[in-house]
Image (cartoon, rainbow, N blue to C red):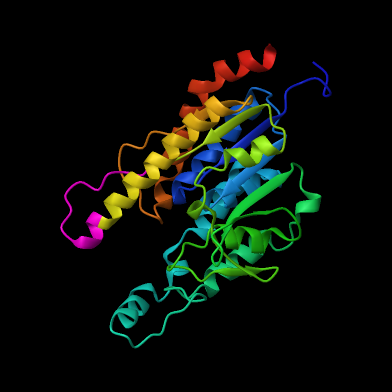
Amino acid sequence: MSADTRKKVSIVIGSGGIKCAAAIGLVKVLEEADIPIDLVVGCSGGSMYAGLIAAGKSAEEMQERTIFLWTTEVMKDYTSNLKATQDGSLRFNERSGLVDDSVMNTRLEETFGQIFFENLKRPLLLVATDLMTGERVVLNKGSLFPAVRASLAIPIIMPPWEVDGALLVDGAAVDPLPVDVAIQEGADVIIAMGFMLSNRGRMRSMTAVQQQLNNIYMNNILRATYAFYNLAHHAEIFPILPDFEEPLGMFDTDKLPDIIARGEAAARAELPHIQRLLAA
């Protein structure tokens, strides 16, 4: 099949924190099967891996960057600032965050600062949220650093990032799995990797109950996203949902081999269906 007639393939990597490293396993499966990736879309934690994949980084390089970026140092001052906010000694506004993001910014800039959308090996689109309007913002120009930083800015925890005069936060606030961005770019086959949030088990505080309700809400949005786009659009959408038996902490990089293996297993389960469609 010629490049002009073959179906355009996009991968979409949704929000999921450290679980997003499962995308390394997904890419491994696609490359082994000689399935081209024509477009990469990412949001939230998935934006980091989308950027690395679009830049053509190897699996080894992506693992190294994961260990470099996902460390407790990027959450500097979280506990003390949370207490100060609660007792009123720290004033909070739309530009605030509970963490000192200097370490995160330094490491993201080292990773992405000299990589530009215009020079990527694969087209890339990253999704963030305009904090003031609630609208989705799709980022696709200039250095990847501000785009990735904005897309994974967890509201309240991390300060927003300003891009072109807009205060941007986590893309998951508007869409934890931006499949429609790939549809709008003309993708015929969309391989969408999403991540279900784990149930918390026994809940012994109001915060824990609140988190559990948020998990239920986000999981239902993810299910609805798959269902809606499968029904409403011509594009073929293949859901890739890695199965994680236990909850993962934000900085569980020691479990990285297992995370990647689960991404690979989920991708292999869908691979025959993807290959049949591409061959049709």
**Is 185 in front, or is 161?**
185
Please tell me whether residue 29 is drawn above or below residue 77 in the rendered image: above
Q: Position of residue 14 (x, y in %)?
A: 52, 44
Q: Hey, which quadrant is residue 135 in on the image?
A: bottom right
Query: Which residue lies at the image location 28% right of the left edge and 84% below the top edge?
Result: 87
Looking at the rendered image, the quarter that the C terminus falls into is top right
**What is the span of residues highlighted in magenta in the rendered image?**
197-209
Q: Hey, which quadrant is residue 235 in on the image?
A: top right
**Is 175 in front, or is 69?**
175
Query: Which residue lies at the image location 72% right of the left edge and 34% below the top edge?
Result: 38
The rendered magenta stretch, by its main secondary structure, is classed as loop
Query: Which residue lies at the image location 54% right of the left edge and 39% below the top edge?
Result: 23
Q: Position of residue 143 (x, y in %)?
A: 73, 61
Please give the count of numbered marks on the rendered protein: 0
Query: Which residue lies at the image location 73% right of the left edge and 23% below the top edge?
Result: 7
Q: Position of residue 177 (x, y in %)?
A: 52, 42
Q: Position of residue 186 (x, y in %)?
A: 72, 33
Residue at the extreme bottom: 89
Please tell me whether residue 225 is drawn above or below residue 79 in the rendered image: above
Please tell me whether residue 215 is drawn above or below residue 191 in the rendered image: below
Magenta stretch: includes residue 163: no
Is residue 196 at least partly visible in the picture?
no
Is residue 187 at least partly visible in the picture?
yes
Looking at the rendered image, the quarter that the N terminus falls into is top right
Position of 264 with respect to 246 (left or right) is right
